[in-house]
Image: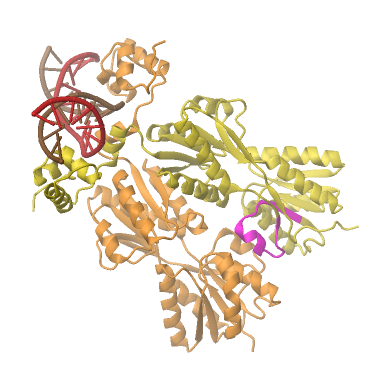
Chain colours: A yellow, B orange, C red, D brown
Amino acid sequence: MPEVTRRPTIVDVARVARVSTATVSRVLNGRRVTDPELIRRVRLAAAELHYRPSGTARNLQAGVTRLIGVVVPDLRNPSFSELLGGLADATAAQDHRLLVADAKESPDEERTLIQELALHCDGLVLCSPRLALDDLARFGRGPLVCTNRSVGDLPISSAGVDSYAGMAEVVRHLAGLGHRHIGYLAGPPTSWSDAERQRALGDTAAGLRIRVTVEPAGSTSDDGYRALPALVAAGVSAVVAFNDLVAIGSLARMRERGFDVPGDISLAGFDDIPVAQFLAPPLTTVRLPTEEVGRRAWDLLWNQLTKAGRTGTVRLPTELVVRASTGAARA
Amino acid sequence: MPEVTRRPTIVDVARVARVSTATVSRVLNGRRVTDPELIRRVRLAAAELHYRPSGTARNLQAGVTRLIGVVVPDLRNPSFSELLGGLADATAAQDHRLLVADAKESPDEERTLIQELALHCDGLVLCSPRLALDDLARFGRGPLVCTNRSVGDLPISSAGVDSYAGMAEVVRHLAGLGHRHIGYLAGPPTSWSDAERQRALGDTAAGLRIRVTVEPAGSTSDDGYRALPALVAAGVSAVVAFNDLVAIGSLARMRERGFDVPGDISLAGFDDIPVAQFLAPPLTTVRLPTEEVGRRAWDLLWNQLTKAGRTGTVRLPTELVVRASTGAARA
DNA sequence: GTGAAAGCGCTAACAC
DNA sequence: GTGTTAGCGCTTTCAC
């Protein structure tokens, strides 16, 4: 039993097996080595020493890391974990791994993380980045994809969902039910998706001569619970929430107030998270293909990684899922 | 403007700045370099070439990666994203990053991932690993922490939650309300936490002379929705679900069947996910300090990384949160 | 204080 | 077919 206190290297294995390091490397990587005796000795030595190749050294030699950096505004937000899931599946299929960091909704943190991750990864995926556009431009030289965020005319790839069309569709749905005054529980002020939704809401409602009241909420159920009363006070007959979580919070408050949904007030959300269909009443919501956004982001990044620099843009359609939380407006 | 087609290295910067690579390195790392002219030239050259140091080369030189590998059975499961969140916060505070991989509930995939990640990381966190104990033992040599999983008497660190006590508490709560027949919507068969809960259920119910019916469900709301009828048919007056998601699915089915909760049937879950309090009725559930488990896992790992090999075990207490979904059994 | 050179652990030319 | 050796890009002694 040889004595090695530090982590064993390929040199140690070569010495113990009485072969060259090249042979060790070849055996371990399944390259052409014919002598079965050598193979045996190498495997034995490697096992005996508990040898594990250094991924870092391999990466340095290979010139790539097969690592993709992902920056998320909030790891705990279920819609980001869904995106992360799609991204992980897609990258794993091509033998790449995810280096994940949580920016905690801070643009400064985001910038710091991007700069650090960029050193260790082959490419970056920025999820709904809160960063200013010109900051983004500086990082655009490396392979980079943004999700759910406009990138202006920057040469940056971007994958996202057509929030504008989605919101337009809910508004028309509600208008069709006779609602003349819609309240919106807005998302985080830094969210580009929220801005898109507000724009669509304004445009569509104006065209339909529908009144709109916007109340700042946020992205959690607590936010929805807290913000609802303002909309009720404003006299809306239907509420659209930035996402399903916010909708759930506001729904709880509606019940507390004794409102019948949708008899007294209608409610719709965004995302179609798994529990949406199990609520009472089941929630009408704009389904976003979030997981697919993750997969598409990888496609885009992969293109940049291989076809050297080809950027692209993907905008995925939404789908209005009408359930029981929206109904005809009171006469 | 110098012509470099490949990614610029420190040598390129040194050449352009007409200094040694050592000086470049020192300037960029804020080491002692006095001549302001040199500093200026280095910074200028670096900026001009858009130079970015190679993290891989640095890691190789440093002998560490500051990367922690995390293997999760299912990235989309909200309770894992919460754990991941806690882990990310804790590691980030000590300048480490997370390399995340989704094993998709497969023990084989898990093994493969562990072996691969181990090559690139300083340590590993295995979340609720489905792997057999002896497989685990083989990986135990490297710094390793398991969450929510017994590790027998293996020299492996482990952080988790006291599922046994949590289940015992719900059962006593239900018994106190007069329930004599409890149904359990079981989790994934490979889940160690589920096994613990079943054991606690059996033990506690036996002590209280309460009847128990266990029905295999899973970990999603769909599973809960699907599995509920069997329990109803068995005549239980209270249902405990493996987690809140499963509880939500079964709750939807109870409503569909016209049951009043908790008038006709009581329901309790595990986790206390954020939406639990917003359901109708608000869900009684065993709150698990999942995020804290993530933080503790890092503490444990950090100990191994620094104090070379000190393993440890942390078992966190649960808390029964009684809301409106549990009530007195029908007389 | 700055430069030359060794070396981190590995793979892949290139010799033999 | 196997061994020798030159790097991959960086940091850090060690001389000067």
Query: Please, is residue A207 above or below residue B204 in the view?
Result: above
The x, y position of residue B75, in whole percent, is: 48, 54
Q: Residue at x 58, y 38 (%)?
A: A159
Quadrant of the rendering where the C terminus of chain A is positioned: bottom right
Query: Please, is residue B202 above or below residue A154 in the view?
Result: below
In this image, A128 relative to B295: left or right? right
In depth, the one of B176 and A131 nearer the eye is A131
The x, y position of residue A171, in whole percent, is: 78, 47
The x, y position of residue B10, in whole percent, is: 31, 21
Q: Residue at x 78, y 39 (%)?
A: A202
The x, y position of residue A313, in whole percent, is: 59, 34
Residue A322 lies in what quarter of the image?
A: bottom right
The answer to whether residue A189 of the structure is visible from this angle is no
The answer to whether residue B307 of the structure is visible from this angle is yes
Whether residue B120 appears in magenta in the rendering, the answer is no
In this image, A258 relative to B7: left or right? right
In this image, B206 relative to C16: left or right? right
Q: Residue at x 36, y 21 (%)?
A: B8
In depth, the one of A40 and A230 nearer the eye is A40
Query: Please, is residue B316 above or below residue A290 in the view?
Result: below
Total labels: the figure holds 0
Query: Please, is residue B8 above or below residue B171 in the view?
Result: above
In depth, the one of B274 and A79 nearer the eye is A79
Q: Which residues are magenta?
A: A267-284
Whether residue A280 appears in magenta in the rendering, the answer is yes
